Structures are given as C-alpha cells and as structure tokens.
Amino acid sequence: MRETTLRDVAELAGVSPRTVSNVVNGYAKVTDTTRAKVEAAIAELGYRPNVLARNLATGRSGQIVVVVPYLDTPYFAELLQGIIPAARKLGYNVLVDQTDGDRQHEGELIGPGPRRFLYDGMIISPLGLAQEDLSARDPALPLVVLGERVSDGTFDHVGIDDVAAATEAVAHLIALGRRRIAAIGDQPYPTGEAAQLRTRGFRAAHTAAGQPVDESLIIGTTRFNRIDGATAMAALLDRPNPPDAVFCYSDLVASGAIHTILGRGLRVPEDVAVIGYDDIEDGRYSQPTISTISPDKKAIAQLAVDRLVLRIAATEPIDGVELRTPHRLIARQSTLGTGTRM
Amino acid sequence: MRETTLRDVAELAGVSPRTVSNVVNGYAKVTDTTRAKVEAAIAELGYRPNVLARNLATGRSGQIVVVVPYLDTPYFAELLQGIIPAARKLGYNVLVDQTDGDRQHEGELIGPGPRRFLYDGMIISPLGLAQEDLSARDPALPLVVLGERVSDGTFDHVGIDDVAAATEAVAHLIALGRRRIAAIGDQPYPTGEAAQLRTRGFRAAHTAAGQPVDESLIIGTTRFNRIDGATAMAALLDRPNPPDAVFCYSDLVASGAIHTILGRGLRVPEDVAVIGYDDIEDGRYSQPTISTISPDKKAIAQLAVDRLVLRIAATEPIDGVELRTPHRLIARQSTLGTGTRM
DNA sequence: ATAGTCCTTTGCAGCGCTGCAAACGGAATT
DNA sequence: AATTCCGTTTGCAGCGCTGCAAAGGACTAT
C-alpha cells in the first residue's frame, strides 16, 4: 500500500495539491471552509507530509548537527540535554556527532562534504581544531562554536568568561588560606586555548592577592578526564613539597585528583583543597562533594540554538559575535569541608 | 553560485548523468577509463552528491534514531558512544532523542508521524512505554529495543540477562556474609519490568542460599537517579534495624546511597556494603569505588545497530528475537573494602 | 562476413513537495 | 451594469537523484 501523498488528499478534498500544501504549512490565506475540507481529508487518509520531499524542494534539511568531542563526558551530555529540546521547539531535529577530539575528524565535519546537506547549521565544541581550521571551513555553513575560541567574525561564539571564572575559583582557594596552589589541566599549545584562559585566571588571582605564582605547580594534561587528574595529582603528591590546594580544569579532573588524594590516606580539604570546573552532577554526590565553577548550561544551550537558527534564517551574512553566559562559583565540601566541622 | 550537480559532472566528463551516479555509488560495472574520466570531473568541479535528493529518490533517509530517556545519564551516554560509530560505519547517521521517560513522548516517536520519514529505523530504550504501546506502533518501523522488554515477535530486543545478573550481585553480598540485604529500585507496575527482573534475581539469590527474603527491605523508586538512592537509603537507615548491604538497581542509585551512608558517619562497606548496576565510569573513580554488574555496552551497541540495519535492509518481515549480551560482576571497594584492609 | 552474446552506458520518468506568478471569483466601486 | 480591486486558489516547473529496462558497443563464435 502506497503512502498517501499531497495529491491524494487534494483529490479527496476537491482542491489543488498546492492548497493542501498551504494548509499543511499554515501558509498564506486559506478560508476556513477550505481548510476544514482539507483537514478532514488529511484525517481520513491519515496523511503525513513527506519530509524528504520537502527537504529536496526547499533545499533545507530541518536538521542541525551538534558536534562534541565525547558524548560520555557528563558536561557535554548535560549540554546536549539542553540543546535538543531547544532545537526541537524551533522545529529542528538534532544530529549528534562525536569526534574524540580528533582534529581531522572535526575538520571533515566543518568542511564541505556530502553530509553537509544533512544539516542546516552546526553547533560545535572543538577540541583538536585550531583557529585557522575554523576559518577555513565551508563559508556557507551557519556555525556556532562553544567553549573558548574567539570568533573570527564569521561565526558566533557562546561561552562563559573563562578567565574571570578561573580567577574566582583560585581566589576562593586563596581566601581559604591556601598558599601552595596547583593547577591541573594547562595546555600550552595552539589548540589548548580554553585551558590557557584558565591558566591566565590562575595567575591573575595570585597577582590580585599579591601572591607569587609557582610555575612548577602548573601541570599540563592532554585531556580533562579523571585519569588525567589522578595521574597529575599523584605526581604532585610525590614531590617533596606538595600543594595544599588544586584548581582542576574540569570536575572530572577534580574527581580523579580527589581519588588519588584519598587513596594516599590524605584528607580533602584538610590536606589538599580541590576545586573543579563545569558543575557536573557527579560533583554534587561524590564524597566529598566538589566545589566548582558552574556555567549556566541551559543558557548556553538556548543561546547557541537561538543564534544558530537566526543564522540559518538569515539571507545575508551576519557578523560573528561573542556571547557570554553567566557562571557562578559553588563552594562545596572539597574546599569548605563537611558541614559538621565548619 | 549554484551547487554543482550530477548533470554538470556528466557534461564535463562527456558521459550521461546516470553513469556519474553509477560511479559515485560504486554501482554496476563501470570501465576504468570511464571511472577515471568521471572522477576527474568530480574532483575538478568539487562535486558532492546531494543527499536530500538521493533520499527522495530512494525513499530512505540513511538515518537511524536512537531514543533514550535521559542523555545525561551516564549509562545512556556511554551506550550512545558505542552506537554512533557503529552506525556511521554502516553508512547511517544517528539522530538522538530523549524522552524524559515520558510515555506519551515515547509513544509519539514510535507511532506514525511526519518525522517518521527522517529515519529508516529506531533503537529505543523505553521507560514509560508499556508492552501494548510497543505492539501498537507503526508496523513498518524497523525497531530494536534495549533494556528489559520482552519482544512481541515484531521487533528485536537486546540486553543482558537481568535476572541472572541481579542474582549474581546479591549472591556476592551473601557470600560476603551479609544477611540483611536491601534492594533499592523496585518498580512493581507494568512499565517497571526491568526493575522487576532485578527484584526477581534478588529473591532468587536468597532462595539459592537458603536465606529468607525480608520484603520490607525491597524499596521502590520511580527512577534510577542518585537522588532516589540517597532518599531510599536515608529511609532505610532511619529504621531500627537497618540493612548491612544494599543492592542498587543502578550505579547512580548506589552512588546516592553511598552518599547518604557516608554522610551519616557510617562506613562502606564495613557498616553497609553496596553494589550497583551498569558499571558507569563514575563508579570506578568514586570514593569508595563501586562494585557493580557490568554489561558489555559495546556489544549491546554493536548488536543493536547490526540487527537494526539488517531489519532495514530486509524485504520481508523478520521474526523478532531476543539477543543476550554478556555481563559480569565487578567487585570493588563498596563491597570488598579498600585493598589495604583486605 | 554475419549473427549472437555479454557487458557497459543511456534515457526516461518520477520520488512528493514547494516557489512563483498567474488565474480566478466575488465584493466593492463608479 | 461595467470595471476595478483584492484575497484565495491554482498550474507549472523543477529540486537532484535513482530504478528500470532498453540501447549501444565490443567481442566471440560460426
């Protein structure tokens, strides 16, 4: 049995296919009587528009793609959780892609290619991609970039003020009286811009407090996973003069660091205070709960989608803008200690 | 500037559009010389096939949709991480949908509707959906169901043997000498089949060990999140005769339960041993690390995709099958204690 | 040299919808 | 009663590709 088409409905309703299309899309002016007739026919035949045909006719897919490095990273999962409904509400479906942070893979996605027809726009959280890759992309692709990557003027960028946030986090540690503060997660190379901004905040907080920065306490990691935090922390604790606080560039890193600290029989925060970044759900339930910088993920998701849809709808190029979303410091047990001891 | 089409390439190469199509798709027999000419033309013009047009012509979208209740639940995120590359490898793109476990939302997705044209098949992990909803779905939709939901013969089901796995988990607690064992996560209503299977395993393990089952220790929760575990555990500990072990129906529940236990100044596993389910990454880094039932997620993902693609390609109905994937018990600190004390 | 065979290439039609602009019909105006 | 006007409805063409079956060409066999 063939799927019913616009033409079938038109025939039954005694109008032209074009009118049925108008009714289906809510287009133009259609008299109530005509609309009623058409709707009755649609209901009777159980008609549903063929999106594939519509896509071809309009040249748009009604889909956007969200590209993240890792899907099982809670931060991205939580972000996606916000993006999908926001897009759906505006009539877009969401394709999801993960790149494993691979530069080539990311490059293929933003470049030209057959898949390009499948989405009208892209929200990407690049990891391996350098600035020039972004600029060399398919210029017709509406693009919104998440995370720290300054716009070159042809796409939008949505994110929190990383320097300010990092500064707050470290200032919090200093305010608690910590003096040997380590940073875990620096990435002193071109694609590590996000990390570098946090490092800048780390320095700024020291400067603001009149404290010297011990450069040897800035530890680089290639990723922001638990294992990275665990490993880096182990190295720090092996030193003759270990830190009394750590600023971790993600909550996962913080989680890994805490794991190592506790595993050595030391206490958090008494021996080493730990603060993370991202405010993932884990941090609210781990033992101890993790102090963190909490970006407003819902706001990021909504803003990114709104902005992307705006770009898609635009008939001529829009200048790229930097969009800042709010964040706040949330102090929990990993810096304050348990409530009972406070 | 117009996008180059098959026709443009054909013209430049001096062949028919159909031949270009054959080259692009690797169809039929094409002589090496022809192929070379066409490929040269493709390269020169930077041609990329228009997937939208292909979709309309073939009536297939080349997309599958994966429907999960929650994306920020680590288990689903990890699963998706396996599904996407597996599908990609077979030439399918993955749409992602989350339903918040809402029955109506899930029902809309598997029913008829315009979006239906957007995917050739669906992998769904239903939560709110009852058996009859699944049976009442669009019969033309190739479907693979994850989690515990016995197939009605028109779709496939992929998952581990929940009863056996739950039995193992509880047997592990019993083997450690625990006698007052609680279960957190039962859902004694139609849509709670997965939970009920675990409860069945809980009972089976007691029976096998010749232990009585204290029904009052089986605690129901509406979801499998941390907060559910935390709340249920608090209620258990408030009792005059609290349990000395808990079998939690997810690692998140276990995490929440541990949070509560430690928050009361009790020890895990000395005072209360805890075992979870799912083997999410958190459990390997939390303090203490969480003993758990580890399903082979990669196997589930691969099997689900393979099976779905098979269904999509099939010209006539395939009988639904039950596909069991492996699982194993992983004992960690939450039942064994820290290595030093062992 | 001619017919037969087989493999490559082609032409046609159409997937189901929408953009565009013209046609239509009824109401308002003169 | 004839004309103008305006909002609704329509017809046409085509988005770019593929399925199908037939045409074409090269080669083999007789």
Image (cartoon, coloured by chain):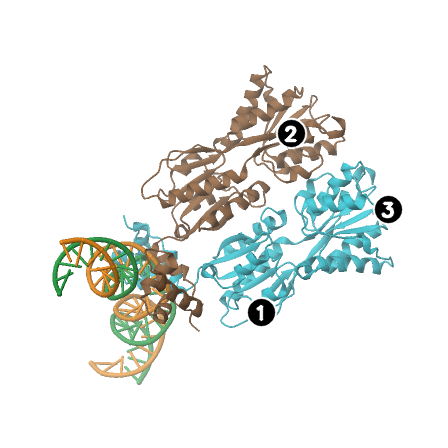
Chain colours: A cyan, B brown, C green, D orange
Q: Residues within 10 Å of mark 2 (few under 14, many from 20)?
A: some
Q: Position of residue A278 (x, y in %)?
A: 68, 51
Of badges 2 and 1, nearer the viewer stands 2
Q: Position of residue B15 (x, y in %)?
A: 32, 67
Q: Tell me if label 1 and label 3 are in contact, CB under 8 Å.
A: no
In the foreground, B21 or B185: B21
Q: Amino acid at mark 1?
A: Thr
Considering the image in quadrants, where does the N terminus of chain B appear?
Answer: bottom left
* Residue to which mark 1 is pinned: A154
Q: Which residue is mark 3?
A: A241
Most foreground residue, B206 or B165? B165
Tell me the chain of label 1. Answer: A
Q: CA distance from mark 2 to mark 3?
A: 35 Å
Residue B130 vertical position relative to residue A283 in the rendered view, above or below: above
Residue behind mark 2: B331
Left or right side of A308 for A236: right
Chain where mark 3 sits: A
Which residue occupies 54% across, 20% down? B204
